[in-house]
Image: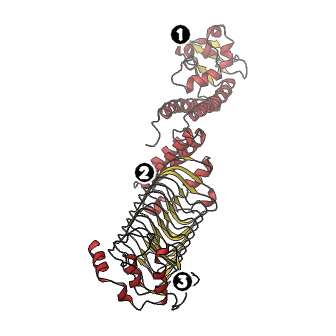
Amino acid sequence: MAERAQWTLATARLADFQPLLPAEEEVVARLLSGTYDRLGDGSRPTAPDPSRVVRAAFLRFLMLGGEPGCRPHEKGIRITGAWIVDTLDLEACHVFRDIGLIDCHFEATPILRAAIINRLFLDGSSLPGLEAERLEARGGVYLRGAQVNGEIAIGQSRLGGNLECDGATIRVAGGHAIDANAIELRNLLLRGATLRGGLAIAGARISADLDAAGARIESTDSLAVDGTEVEIGGSVVLRKASAEGEVRLVASVIGGDLDASGATLTHPGAMALDISRCAIKGAFFLRGEASVTGALSMTGASIGTIHDEVASWPGQGDLLLNRCRYGAFIAAPVDAASRLDWLSRQAPERWGEDFWPQPYEQLAAVFREMGHGEDARAVLIVKERLQRRARRARAKNPLWRAALTVADGFLAATLVYGRQPLLAFVWLILFWLVGVGIFGMAERAGAFKPNSAVVLRSPEWTLCGVERTQQRLLGAPPQAVDGRAAPGQTQLACYREQGEASSYPEFNPWFYSLDTLLPVLDLGQKSFWRPNPIGRHGRVAISYFYLQAIVGWALSLLAVAGFSGLVKSP
């Protein structure tokens, strides 16, 4: 580069450009002033006015140092309102001073490929493109308000300052409007710019901000912004910006915020915003009438806080949250109903999977950290239901699927999949009260008998089963003995009138039902009394007796399993 610059300085002379054009004479006359050399009224020309035409080769001669008596000011070349003919070719050149070509019209694309410069000002200029790959600049490159009808190729460049395209309009027929892949700079500013093409900054290193607030980006294919593996020390600002096509920030690191407040991101039926595996140390803003038409992928992303609102969430099936981690919700819905609606906008089957449990677990963890324990439990209950449904759907054997359906239904009704183990005690209380009613009714109907072989073989119990008007043979040798029961009196009621029964424990339906239900208790009632299966009340009581014993064991074991977490899905 230095050799080429030296060769140019040694061979190019002012005499080579004689006779100078009128505009060039004006430039030479004001070289040492250090002020902007305004040609005409300084506005961008729309036609090659002879008073404004400057040859690109002449500008190159001056930028590379000129000759004694015709050297540029220390501030560099500063020209406004020029019509620049031919190609300004500074490839591999070393320009020590600023290059300022403001509100100029370029007939050909300037070439600064692999050049080393101080600063480049093309504000308000009209040019068919810019070839500046591998450019090195101590300062920045400025195209504020420029009209560019071609690609700005500035990939792999290193800028000590900013690339500023605020208010610029950049159009390409295909590809990217700005190709800044692997660029290194301080700020990339596209505020209010219009890019009809796309922005490519894959692998870029931006020490401060990427600010595209109010920008309009239209892709020529499907990719509006390619920001794969970008390192940004500050924030990404898309506030009130619009993008037609995919905005991709996959595997990027953002030291500040990702602010998409009021942004309109449109890519129907495909990915609209992809921040998969992105590390956002600050906040993610998706509010202020922001709109996402297409999919929003936050798969594997790490986000400090989320600031969003329901109206800005993507549509059904367009949200991907698998393995996404975040710290809290700020100025956003923080209740189970709203956030379950948020999670329900995922459609794992669209992406070839059946269920993603992690988003539910992450949401529940955030709820717990924010002090919303009940909301966390509600989220985990829904997660259990959906995860078990997915498991049943994977079962190929119909019998196994049916068994899973029964087991899942039982766990849902009794323990809510282990998320509410106290519900088992509610069921125990319910069965206890039902038992009190059934056993109490059976006891009043005389459908109980002593649970003692001695009593059941005693004459008192036997004769109470016979009315007084009848007799029964007892003893050996058998003798006819009168019955003891009054007409219509039950055997149990008769027995209780006998003196021999005075020392027998009384029946209590409350304690009998509890004694039957809880296997760990022994209140004595079950040891002394048992339903008598003779008669309708007795058959109902003995059937419920067995049912309650089984239910008691099952609910007791389920309660223990629920508190220990054994029935929860892994």
Q: Which colour scheme is used?
A: secondary structure
Q: Which of 211 and 459 is in front in this view?
A: 211
Mark 2–mark 3 Cα distance, whole angstroms, equals 89 Å
Whichever of callouts 3 and 1 sits on the residue coming sooner in the sequence is: 3
Q: Name the residue under label 2.
A: 399
Q: Is residue 278 shown above or below 123?
A: above
- Quarter in which the N terminus is drawn: bottom left
The quadrant in which residue 311 appears is: bottom right
Element carrying mark 3: loop
The three-letter code of the residue at mark 2 reads Leu
In this view of the protein, can residue 5 be seen by the observer?
A: yes
Q: Nearer the viewer, residue 339 or 312?
A: 312
Mark 3–mark 1 Cα distance, whole angstroms, equals 146 Å
Q: Name the residue under label 3.
A: 39
Q: Are there few (<14), some (14-19), or many (20+) residues within 10 Å of tag 1?
A: few
Single out the mark in the foreground, 3 or 1: 3
Residue plotted at (29% across, 75% down): 6
Residue 185 image point, x, y percent? 42, 62
The quadrant in which residue 261 appears is: bottom right
Single out the mark in the foreground, 2 or 3: 3
Element carrying mark 1: loop
Q: Which of 170 and 173 is in front in this view?
A: 170
Mark 2–mark 1 Cα distance, whole angstroms, equals 63 Å
Whichever of callouts 2 and 1 sits on the residue coming sooner in the sequence is: 2
- Residue 477 numbered tag: 1
Residue plotted at (58% across, 44% down): 378
Q: Is residue 215 shown above or below 129?
A: above
